[in-house]
Image: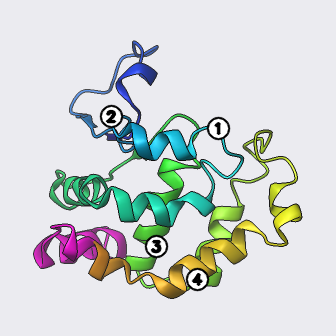
Amino acid sequence: MIDLRNDDERGTDVAPRPTGLSTVQLPLDGVEDTAFWQDWHGRPEFGTPLYYRPFLDRFPARTAAVFTAIARAAPGGVAVHCGIGRDRTGLIAIMLLALAGAGPEEIAADYALSEDRVPFGRVGTFYEDAGTTPAEVISAMLAELDVEAHLRAAGVTRDDLAAIRERLLEPDR
């Protein structure tokens, strides 16, 4: 299991973890970078696909650490989670789906599955006011982002990328 939450978000587990389940804590946000968060925190587009690309540009090593952990995890499934399961986990899921060969439309449709489950209270009418949708933002980001090249530049090895693809596409191995 890969936990993307910040230290101040984690509490005591309410149920015991199954035997053999290990958790790697890799806070994705980089909250110590106050300059980045001063600009983004509190804006309606924070935590939406509109901040994903600026985040990726600012914190490539953090994303690379998550992908390296996925690649090197023990055989079996790997759960990745954050607080709600849409923002940080959504970014990682988008990138995993791109590595697996899913197209931008498929990825945007997958992301949209979480929209009805998670309130967009802080976003309000932002997308409508901006004349766009989350699907359009995700598609535009993926049109200009080579996920593999981004991860390689951040330090993810070719072997680790191959291991991730094998884990995603050939789960019996």
Residue at mark 1: 42
How far is the residue under mark 2 from the one under mark 1? 16 Å
Q: CA distance from mark 1 to mark 3?
A: 29 Å
What span is in magenta?
151-173
Q: Residue 172 is drawn in which quadrant?
A: bottom left
Residue 117 % position (x, y): 74, 45
- Identify the residue under disc 2: 32
Q: Say few, some or many: other residues with alpha carbon within 10 Å of mark 2 (under 14 / 14 to 19 / 20 or more).
A: few
Q: Which residue is mark 3?
A: 97
Which three-letter amino acid code belongs to the residue tagged 3? Leu
Residue 129 drawn above or below residue 166: above
Q: Quadrant of the N terminus?
A: top left
Q: Residues within 10 Å of mark 1 (few under 14, many from 20)?
A: few
Q: Is residue 137 left or right of residue 41?
A: right
Quarter of the rendering containing residue 24: top left
Could you tell me how far apart the alpha carbons at marks 4 and 3 are, in whole angstroms?
A: 9 Å
Q: Amino acid at mark 4?
A: Pro
Is 164 magenta? The answer is yes
Q: Residue, x 19% and y 59% (percent of image)? A: 68
**Camera-nearest label, 4 or 3:** 4
Residue lying at 64% horizontally and 37% vertically, measured from the top left:
42
Element assignment for label 3: helix
**Which residue shows up at 47% across the image and 62% down it?**
54
Residue under numbered circle 4: 104
